[in-house]
Image: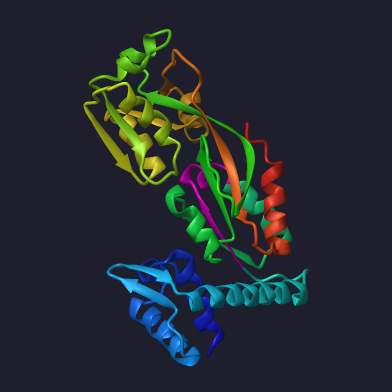
Amino acid sequence: MEFRELKTFQVVASLLSFNKAANVLNYAQSTISSQIQSLENSLGKTLFVRSGNKISLTPAGVKLLDYTQRLINIENEILANFKNLSDKHGTLTIKTPQSVSSCLFPPLIKEFQLLFPNIGFDIDWCSSYNLSEILSSGTIDLAFLISDYFSDKLLNIEELTNINLVLATLPDDELTKHSGITLTDLNGRAMIFAKSDCSYKLILQKMIIESNIQLKKTIEINNIDAIKRLVIYGNGIAFLPEMVIKEELDNGILKAIKWNGPAFNAKLLMIWHKEKLLSEPLKAFMYMVRKIDLR
């Protein structure tokens, strides 16, 4: 058997999906299937039970996953202890809301590069629904999440700060004249949400559904800058972290609607797998994140 086959098996076993593993590893699905088949032939054991589009581990698969995870941990430990700490190379792979990457990462990465000039970054948007699976696969070093609640027994979850969320609209919108609006004031209005900026949008969406508020329509889009421009062109009210529209609010381009109720707050969380071996660059990056004034 080959070690790369074991690594592929570990990702498939963690995600319980050949298709998801192919996306994570950037392989063709046929390559994933071929490597698993080769591994099964080498061991003389079936590793997965296949039932339609679903798979599950056989007892042999469960046993092999334990061995594989230990081998991967040993490999990581060897690499971490034998590399020259003063001349680090490699890439930090991070999942994060776009609002965090656009507002917080540019100055942070600049500072980080002074210490680790040869370390690159692979930064992608996060999705809370499969965050545990992705971190368990070992392909992601670190994740960030903006949410009112998140829990997983396999993950380390560190609360960094509270993030203020606001309803943003044009300065001449009649709702900006109110001393404080309620959910009923959103009846018949168009709302704009960040489609893939993690789960903070669910805070307001849940309230709207529970209160039977009838919106005119919703617009969901993957780009924070596009959301701001949609609001500027009068397409609706956006629900965003205040930090991403601070410049527009300060310049009077947009205005935050006063809310008659508890402030919309979510937590900024830093998340990593409990079995993740933290390299020196990764530990340094996490330390720098903790130092940032996120208020």
The residue sitting at 41% across, 69% down in the picture is: 56
Q: Nearer the viewer, residue 169 or 253?
A: 169
- Does any portion of residue 253 appear in the rendered image? no
Which residue extends farthest front? 59
Q: Could you say which is closer to the camera, residue 253 or residue 17?
A: 17
Task: Report the label total.
Answer: 0
Name the spot of residue 174 as percent of width and height, x first: 31, 13
Residue 94 among those drawn in magenta: yes
Q: Is residue 208 above or below residue 154?
A: above
Front residue of 249 and 264 = 264
Residue 95 screen position, x and y as percent: 51, 54
- For this orientation, the residue located farthest to the top is 179
Side (left or right) of 285 relative to 96: right
Foreground pick, 257 / 44: 44
Q: Position of residue 224 (x, y in %)?
A: 41, 41
Q: Is residue 40 magenta?
A: no
> Residue 144: x percent and y percent?
55, 48
Residue found 38% across the figure and 85% down from its top: 34
In the picture shown, does residue 70 fall above or below 155?
below
Q: Is 229 displayed left or right of 78 in the figure?
A: left
Which residues make up the magenta segment?
A: 91-104
